[in-house]
Structures are given as C-alpha cells and as structure tokens.
Image (spheres, rainbow, N blue to C red):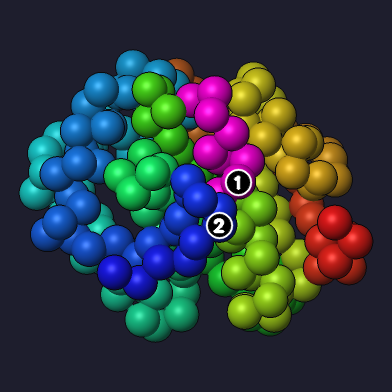
Amino acid sequence: MFAYKIDSEVSLALPRPKIDAEPLFQIIEESRKELQVWLPWVPIMKSVVDEEKFLTSVLKNFGSEHSLNTVILYKGTPAGMISFNKFNTTNQCADIGYWLGTKHVGNGIIHRAVAGICTLGFADYDIHKIEIHAAVENVRSNQVAKKAGFHFDGSLRANELLANGFHDENVWSLLKEEWKKH
C-alpha cells in the first residue's frame, strides 16, 4: 500500500479499488443520511461496484496528474476520503474535498488529514494556494477550514448545487508562505 503517514493514527493512502471499495461503500451506507446533505454524489453511489468504478477512475486521474484522491486510514482502517479535486497547474493551486464516516467524527481525523494533504500539496506538488469550498450552512466543514488556519476569502452566491438546490458557498484559502509559518 502506498501511504503517507500523518501520525500514529492517521494516514492517507492511494485507493486500492478491489480492496477498499467494500469498506468505503459500507461507511457511505452507514453515513448516508449525514453525507447526502452536503455531497451530491452520495445518492448515485448505490453499490460496491459503483465505489470500485469510482476508485478506479480516480487512480486514472492521479496517473494523468489531474487530481489526487486518497483514502483516510484511521488506525489502519478506512474512515473516509480526502482529495485534491483538481490541480490548476496554470495558477499552481488546488481545492480540497473530504468526507468522513459518521462514526469517526469527533476524533480530529479530518483536521489531521487536511494538515497532511496540505503538506503533500505544498512540499511535493509545489502548490502555491490550496482552497476549501464549503456550503455556508455546512458548519463542520467551515470549522475544519478555520481550525486548519485557512483564510476566509468570502462567499459565492448560489455556487454549490446540493440535493435541495443551490447554496451559497464559502471559499477558504491557505498560501504556501502561510503554511510554512505553522
């Protein structure tokens, strides 16, 4: 397994579609009610096969340097995912997306995963700026950005389509020079 160890409990690993699809799909099933509010892809993820196809596609995107999707491992077990959704090579920036199974919330996992992926982005990918976009009402995701030291850049009107319609979206950013100061 190709993994980046953040600390003794949390690591980020490239997905192994045939191995990781089942446990990740199970986490989605257990957390579906909470996840589908903020993640529009949850309703279309209906089977382990769907998850395996998704994981295979993100590995292709990784190979072509379009994105980096990783499995969040908590104590060696999949707990969710975090990714650079796409790399903007022209402007040397990327945006982070993440989700965590409901049973893992409250252990500081996402905060550590965000710190880890920022280190990868700034140190290994030479990114200048990393962004987090979150619906204004998504209190937890906005709190993650704030706690991770991201700067609140502002809100974009009706910029995120969720299950119940368009929502205003907060944009948070962290610059490489700010990250170096942490």
Q: Mark 2 packing: few (<14 Cα in 10 Å), some, or many (20+)?
A: some
Q: Name the kind of residue labelled 1 in the image.
A: Arg
Label 2 – label 1 distance at C-alpha: 7 Å
Vertical side of 11 occupied by 28: above or below: above
Residue 120, image quadrant: bottom right
Q: Which residue occupies 62% across, 79% down? A: 124
111 displayed left or right of 151:
left
Residue sitting nearer the eye, 160 or 38: 38
Tell me residue 128's x, y (percent).
77, 72
Residue sitting nearer the eye, 15 or 43: 15
Instruction: Tell me the quadrant of the picture where the C terminus can be found.
Output: bottom right
Examine the rendering and report whether any part of residue 13 can be seen: yes
Q: Name the kind of residue labelled 2 in the image.
A: Ile
> Which residue corresponds to mark 2?
6
Find the residue positioned furthest to the front. Answer: 8
Residue sitting nearer the eye, 45 or 21: 21
Q: Which residue occupies 55% across, 53% down? A: 7
136 displayed left or right of 42:
right
Of callouts 2 and 1, the N-terminal one: 2
Tell me residue 31's x, y (percent).
32, 23
Q: Is residue 107 magenta?
A: yes
Tell me residue 118's x, y (percent).
66, 61
> Which residue corresponds to mark 1?
112
Instruction: Tell me the quadrant of the picture where the N terminus can be found.
Output: bottom left
Q: Is residue 64 magenta?
A: no
Cβ–Cβ under 8 Å for marks 2 and 1:
yes
Q: Give, as a single range, the part of the protein colored magenta.
A: 105-113
Q: How many labels sit on residues? A: 2
The tag on residue 62 is: none
- Under tag 2, what secondary structure? loop
Vertical side of 46 occupied by 36: above or below: above
